Amino acid sequence: MNAVRVLLLCLSVLVSFATHAHPASQSQIAISRDYQQVKLMLTLPLDQLAIALPQAGQWQYQASPDFHGLAEYLNQHMSLSQSGERLNIALGRVSLTRSQEVSEEYEVNVVLSASLNTTDHSKLVLAYNAIQHKVINHRTVVTLVNDIHQGTMFDGPVLLGVLRYKHTNIGISGSSSDIPVMGSIFSHGMAHIVTGTDHLAFLLCLLLITGMSAKGRKWQQQRASVTDCVKLVTAFTAGHTVTLIANLLLPDPVVSNWVEAAVAVTVFLSAVHVITPLYRGKPYWMAISFGLVHGMAFSSALNVTGLSAVTTTFAALSFNLGIELVQIGIVCLLVPCFNIWRQTKLYPIIRIILGMAVAVLSAVWVIQRITPYLSDLDTTLNSSMLANLIGITIIATALRYVCTPRPALKNVKRVMS
């Protein structure tokens, strides 16, 4: 009897280890919604789907799997309703890939879409039982990846619920006014540029030399007008707007460490240009060309999965308007201060020190973004730190202005006018 108990105990332990090593597969439904359509991205474990749809068991052995019949099957076992009326769901791209969790298993990836009634703002109801009606312990996790109405473009996926046997319906809340959502995207653009250290460093480099002329390998000190600086940062915004929209409209947006490293390289070149001129002429082309690189990196801040091209473009423009507002605000605060310091012998020293600091920091970013060795080094700049730095600059400038002798003070007033 004791031997039987020991054997049963060993078997239970082995079963528990096997269960832990091979967790039960589950399906995923990721939902995106914009003004015109709803897109559903299904990830179905092939072994589970084959139980409910036997012909699916042959797909992994076919060089070009024949997904014929899948659309009809899904149409029988899922529906999307708005105000009680069933929407027409169209089958899009279907692919077969290896599971990321268990390499020996396969997953079926299905993209579905349905057009919305734009005048109806009631909630949607998803009904789905494609696998769990045959496999009663199967689970389907439903997430809202992106919803232009709920403002989830940068908050990450939201769990809507888990579908299972005899629990096959889930609701998606109705749409709200578009203005608060666009305002949220606009404010997100403002916050993104404030916390984007590399973009702020590039902006600082632009302001340090705007209005100055190069003579050989040296800068000739001249005052800068706010208008010239606004034009310059607007050229930068125009550049990153083009690549931001273009990248977001790609089926798979390009977001990688190499893009981030390229941004750091542009900051490094700008810092070297602050120390010693790398080229002559107006810096607008530099702002536009470097802005093209920065726009590729900005795309990581917006999630546009499943959104239409019109909605994507609209969201990107709102995001960039927020960035532009912060940039213009920084210009209006710093340019008058820089103009006062440009009339002193200290400005070349200040300019070189700031240029060297940005050059060192950007070199660290380049190494950090292409190697893992410096990945834990914190080189971010938050809004409070930025406010403190601007405040220190303004206070130092005010003290300099007050302490300037009267004859020099007249020259300063002439410069400010």
Image (cartoon, grey):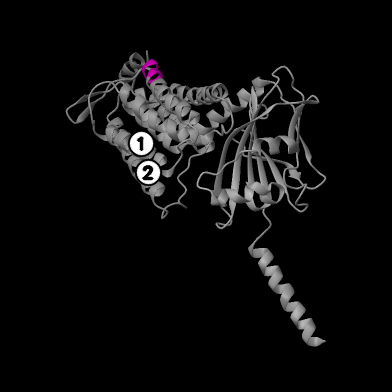
Residue on which the image places disc 2: 361
Magenta segment, which residues? 226-231
Report the front residue among 170 and 380.
Answer: 170
Of the two numbered discs 2 and 1 on the same chain, state the one appearing first in sequence. 1
Q: Is residue 99 left or right of residue 38?
A: left
Q: Main secondary structure of the magenta part?
A: helix
Q: In which quarter of the image is residue 5?
A: bottom right
Image quadrant occupied by the C terminus: top left
Q: Is residue 110 left or right of residue 250?
A: right
Coordinates of residue 95 in the picture (x, y in percent): 55, 42
Which kind of residue does numbered mark 1 sit on?
Val
Coordinates of residue 42 in the picture (x, y in percent): 64, 41
Asked whether the beta carbons under mark 2 and mark 1 sit within 8 Å of each other, the answer is: yes
Q: Is residue 23 left or right of residue 363?
A: right
Q: Is residue 271 above or below residue 12?
A: above
Residue on which the image places disc 1: 267
Label 1 packing within 10 angstroms: few (<14), some (14-19), many (20+): many
Provide the secondary structure element on which disc 1 rests.
helix
Q: In which quarter of the image is residue 119?
A: top right
